[in-house]
Image: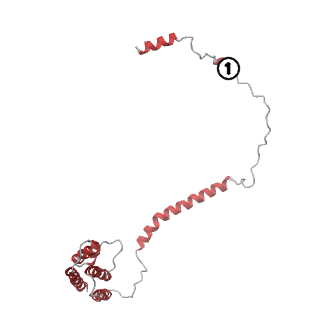
Amino acid sequence: MAVAALLIVVVAAGGTSPITFVNRLDDRPPPQDSGPQTDIPLPTELPDALAVPLTVYLLLLAGLVLFGLVGIILAFELPRWRRSRGVRGVEVESGEVGETAVVRRVEKALQEFTAHPDRPPRDAVIAAWLALEATEERLPHQTPTEFTEKLGVDAVVLKDLYQRARFGHEDVTETQARRAQQELSRIVRELA
């Protein structure tokens, strides 16, 4: 039905189109513009600054690519190489090693804690935890739980008291401060 309607429209419009048919077999080339031409001299040679052989550019490009590849390889391999070497050349603060150094640090931490008996309870609990941290190095990425696991002793009670005192909103009581001191003393005895 649509095709028949289209044919009727084509037949009805025959000869009334504004477009005229041009036979392309008679085409001739367009006439040449014979207007005045300006004579602009074209350069035949490059300036000396640009007249560098192509091989120099290719060598420069190859050098840059090589430099980039070496940089990428170093970026990936240097950290791996450092990890494989391990930690070497670390200086010990006091030159002490072994059990005697740990025992001295533990005793010093306990003395610092007991040197200030008139602290507020919250400060006393936090000081007990800091005294425990002074006995063994706590790495910056370690949580209190990870630190107490690394110690090898049961420090869960002191850790919980510390977290309540440090991050909690309720008041810390004298009983909790005494409990923190008892826990610190017990842990120090176990570590020594």
What residue is drawn where x is 56% and y is 12%? 16
Query: Which quadrant of the view contains residue 33?
Result: top right
| Element type where label 1 sits in the image | loop
The tally of labels here is 1
- Percent position of residue 109, x then y: 30, 86
What residue is drawn where x is 23% and y is 81%? 177
Q: Which of the image's four quarters has the C terminus?
A: bottom left
**Viewer-nearest residue: 15 or 168:** 168
> Which residue position holds label 1?
27
Count residues near mark 1 (Cα–Cα under 10 Å), then give few for <14, some for 14-19, many for 20+.
Answer: few
**Viewer-nearest residue: 2 or 79:** 2
User: What colour scheme does the image use?
Assistant: secondary structure
**Left or right, residue 60 beside residue 129:** right
**Viewer-nearest residue: 29 or 64:** 29
- Percent position of residue 56, x then y: 66, 56
**Left or right, residue 142 beside residue 89:** left
Q: Which of the image's four quarters has the N terminus?
A: top left
The amino acid type of the residue labelled 1 equals Asp
**Left or right, residue 72 beside residue 32:** left
- Residue 3 vs 79, above or below: the answer is above
- Percent position of residue 96, x then y: 36, 88
- Percent position of residue 130, x then y: 31, 80
What residue is drawn where x is 67% and y is 52%? 54
- Residue 66 vs 114, above or below: the answer is above
